[in-house]
Amino acid sequence: MSEFLNAENKQVFWSWKSLKNRLFHFLQTDEKQIRSAIVKSFLENRIDSIIITDKENRILTFNQAAEITFGYQSQEVLGKDITFLMQVPYENTDQVTSWRKEALGGKKDGEIFPIDVSITKIVVGKMIFFVRIIRDLSEKKETEKIWTAHILMQADLKAKNDFLSTVSHEIRTPIHAIMNYTECLIQGLDGPLLEAQKTSLENVYTASKHLVDLVNGLLQFAKMTPDEYKLTVELCPLVNLMQSSIEIISFLAKQKHLEIHTDFPKEEIFLDANRKNLQEIFFNLLSNAIKFSKEGAITVTLKTFPEKIMVSVTDTGCGISEENLPKIFIPFWSAPGRETQKEHTGLGLSITKHLVELQGGTIEVVSKKDIGSTFTVYFPIVSKDL
């Protein structure tokens, strides 16, 4: 019985040993497969592009993120030199095992784009590999470019506002002197005046006062953003304001033998708005029309609609070319080649647009070269109960 048990135990022992060896071999094989699956999953699920090369820069691994970034399928690049995809930043690999550089990559469609490359040197026995983790910097560079442009624009705007503030202060002093001397003449302190002379001096005084208001507005415009610009709103008679603006500026039209035609309703039209801003808008549009017209007539129109009021000024001047129309409201811009360019600051229309928008309105322009222009302003009608 003992011999039988010994023989049976021996058989069980050898069977168990064989099973153990096979199980150990199976576990070893399974471990390699698990490791391989983990590495593959790591490479394919990274949002960064990963490219592995040998020491000759031949591509061995090209993950899905790299396919998306460069536009190539992995089978198209495996075994090829990586230099056709990107610049290879040089480092002395005998001294450095990892480094990071910015370089340029090339897509399948020919686009060149900025990339960030992190390179790690891996040594396995006598074999050397390089793992490159790559990020597309296009969006980052574009954001930096936009931010830089914004900073430059802000600096440019500040410089122009400082210029406006300085010039405005310099202009105000002589204007006040003109107003004081004119007022003395009107009051007859230097002798009696003819009625026509008195009327002319009153127009000079009114125009000077308007210029002072403009300078003060420029100072405020230079210091404040639209959100900070506080408006004093009142019920304004539009027909009266437009007629007074025409009277002030009519002498300029007479000097150029220009007629000013009006198309106003018989009854007064009222608008809840800032009076000074409205006067400035009308004055700028009229002076602009006269400035760029050599002959013909200026037509000023006022119409009402159920939800808005329209004011338009049409001239028979030099007109504006189609390619320049989008630029006319840009501050300090002046159309090249105009005879009046030296007298043109490039501020009038940009200020006008700003003032119109402060009133909640819009301004449009229709123009044809050598025929003339029509500037149209629309003001929304706001109920007095609001």
Image (cartoon, helix red, strand yellow):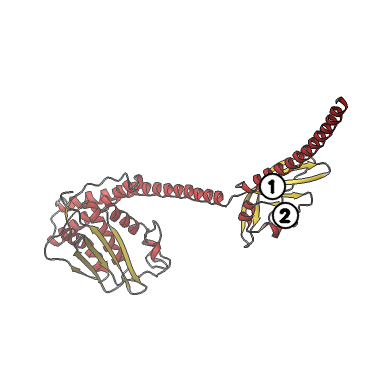
**For residue 347, which quarter of the picture?**
bottom left
- Label of residue 82 in the image: 2
Image quarter in which the N terminus is found: top right
| Residue at figure coordinates x 23%, y 64% from the top left | 251
Q: In this view, does 69 lie above or below 255?
A: above
Residue at 40%, 62% (x, y): give it: 327
Q: Residue 73 carries which label?
A: none
- Kindly report the distance in space between the C-alpha atoms of the residues bearing marks 2 and 1: 10 Å
Residue toward you, 367 or 16: 16
Whole-percent x, y for residue 249 in the image: 23, 62
The type of residue carrying mark 1 is Arg
313, above or below 89, in the image: below
User: Callout 2: helix, strand or loop?
Assistant: helix
Residue at the spot 63% in from the left edge and 52% down from the top edge: 64
Three-letter amino acid code at disc 2? Answer: Ile
Q: Is residue 345 above or below residue 259?
A: above
Proximity of marks 2 and 1: CB atoms separated by less than 8 Å: yes
Q: Where is residue 263 shown, x and y percent of the image?
A: 18, 68
Q: Mark 1 points at which residue?
A: 132
Q: Position of residue 237 (x, y in %)?
A: 15, 56
At mark 1, the secondary structure is: strand
Query: Residue 198: where, in percent of width, then height?
Result: 15, 58
